[in-house]
Amino acid sequence: MDETELVERLAAIGWKGSRGVILGPGDDAAVLRGGLAVSTDMMVEGVHFSFDWVTPTEAGFRAGAAALSDMAAMGASPEALLVSMALPAGDPELGEALQRGVRAAGDRVGAVIAGGDVSRTPRAVVLDVVVVGRVRDGGVRRSGAQPGDDLWVSGVVGGAAAAVAAWSQGREPAPAARVRFAAPPDRTGLGRALAAQGLASAMIDISDGLVLDAKRLAKASSVAIRVRRDLVPVDTEAGGDLNRALEGGEDYELMFTAHPKGKERVLALERELSVQLTRIGTVGQGADVALEDSEGRQVRPGRGGYDHFADPSGNRG
């Protein structure tokens, strides 16, 4: 059973519908009536990070930034964070350092830490961050892509995966790659702008790999997505290569679809926000995702990213 199937089974048990919830499981955040958006993101030592790789403060920042990325993908304005952590006994300094990191991620977007919980763990540190924000008109969902849309991605991809690969091989990553892992970018301003201007028909953040998250977008929208391999913006400065850019994950960039008529407005946002935006593919009839070369030849991708339960090692590296 892979992660997607497990999530679907759990959602089937837990989600029975509610008049107060207008968007339940299956997107980057739940949306409550009145425009409240809520998401949660968990990071586990030894799976998502190692203290041999990053400091506790950096681990906290990364956890907060990753959780806030879900708000960006909805076009939401984050307002508050709830931080829960499981810590080894007798190590309050570790908890304080993690909390300082999460707070710094919240400060970057104007979201405060409003509460949380703490528990003891016999082994791995667990950090769970809940984000509460607000959306207009239900937010931008994964399910709005239409045949004929263009596929876009923000920033560059593959750098964080290059860092993980280096650490897993006993090497120090390039400084730029380490930064991409330890300090994910903030794309909440971009997400809000795309939503406010009605440019993004569907959107998702790239957490588990560009191809895998494109598959999630395609499934939610019941469309086919074609990704041009030669157009994907690879983070070469951080040592990323094309395969890592397609499958590595950890980038927390935004991938979105938009009508071709909105191209100039999307590029205007690129200039206004100083965020690289690249058209990397198209949306068509059908289902699933295919990779294309510059001449239009298609190759079906494999799994295309990280899956907690499909990876027998259970290790993100």
Image (cartoon, helix red, strand yellow):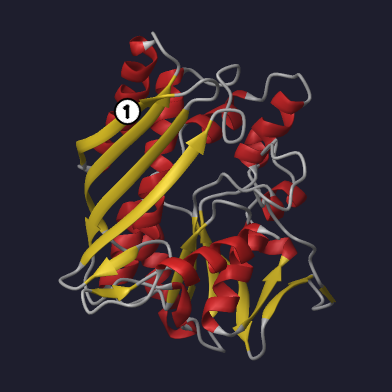
Reading the image, the residue beneath label 1 is 118
Give me the residue at 68% from left, 51% from top: 309
Please state which of residues 296 and 84 is positioned toward the viewer in this rendering: 84
Please state which of residues 257 and 206 is positioned toward the viewer in this rendering: 206
Picture coordinates of residue 304, whole percent (x, y): 72, 59
- The quarter of the picture where the N terminus appears is bottom right
Give me the residue at 35% from left, 61% from top: 191
**Would you say 218 lies left or right of 125 here?**
right
Above or below, 48 against 17 in this view is above
Question: Residue 233 lies in what quarter of the image?
Answer: bottom right
Picture coordinates of residue 218, whole percent (x, y): 59, 76
Q: Which amino acid does label 1 sit on?
A: Val
- How crowded pointer 1 is (Cα within 10 Å; few <14, some 14-19, many 20+) is rated as few
**Would you say 93 lies left or right of 294 here?**
left
Please state which of residues 310 and 186 is positioned toward the viewer in this rendering: 310
Picture coordinates of residue 156, whole percent (x, y): 57, 49
Residue 245 visible to the viewer: yes
Q: What element carries label 1?
A: strand
Above or below, 208 against 297 in this view is above
Above or below, 255 against 253 in this view is below
Give me the residue at 25% from left, 71% from top: 196
